[in-house]
Image (cartoon, rainbow, N blue to C red):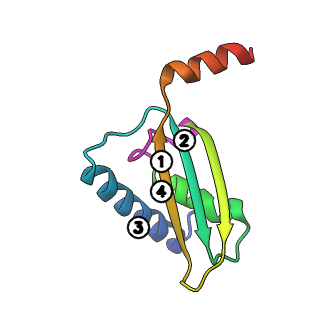
Amino acid sequence: MYTPPEVKEYRERVASHAFAAMRAKRLKPFEYAWVIVTVYNVRLDLDNAVAELLDGMNGIVYPNDGRIVVLHLYKNRDKCGPRARVTVKAVDADLVATAAARAT
């Protein structure tokens, strides 16, 4: 599948920031994740603005974005330029297994 160069560059920047943040806290990728994303001053639809951001953290913050079990998205405006603020928390695998068992 073709990926435009600007999208590839954005994913690489996200990966670089994610790697630095995880390394600074001496964290390994979370097996399951709860992700909170706030984007500021972005004209795109919220889902489009966040998709590449989540893809850029694959293999660094979590094995892949399919391991995100809770996702909160927010869109705000302020006086600063476009940016995103991301918080990721580990979700216990036993909790995920219990929720999955209850859903079936």
Mark pair 1, 4: CA separation: 14 Å
Q: Is residue 103 above or below residue 80?
A: above
Q: Is residue 78 above or below residue 62?
A: below
- Labels 1 and 4 touching (C-beta < 8 A): no
Mark pair 4, 3: CA separation: 8 Å
Going from N to C along the chain, the mark reached first, 4 or 2, is 2
Which numbered tag is attached to residue 59? none
- Labels 4 and 3 touching (C-beta < 8 A): yes
Q: Residue at x 30, y 42 (%)?
A: 27
Q: Three-letter amino acid code at disc 2?
A: Trp
Q: Three-letter amino acid code at disc 4?
A: Gly
Say which quadrant the N terminus sits in: bottom right
Task: Indicate whether residue 65 is drawn in magenta.
Answer: yes
Foreground mark, 3 or 1, reads 1
Give the residue pinned by disc 2: 34
- Labels 2 and 1 touching (C-beta < 8 A): yes
Give the residue pinned by disc 1: 88
The magenta segment: 58-67
Mark pair 4, 2: CA separation: 16 Å
Going from N to C along the chain, the mark reached first, 3 or 1, is 3
Q: Position of residue 4 (x, y in %)?
A: 56, 70
The kind of secondary structure element at disc 1 is strand
Task: Give the crowd class for mark 1: few <14, some 14-19, many >=20 residues within 10 Å.
Answer: some
Q: Residue at x 57, y 57 (%)?
A: 37
Q: Residue at x 58, y 86 (%)?
A: 79
| Residue at the bottom extreme of this rendering | 79
Which numbered tag is attached to residue 13? 3
Q: Three-letter amino acid code at disc 3?
A: Arg
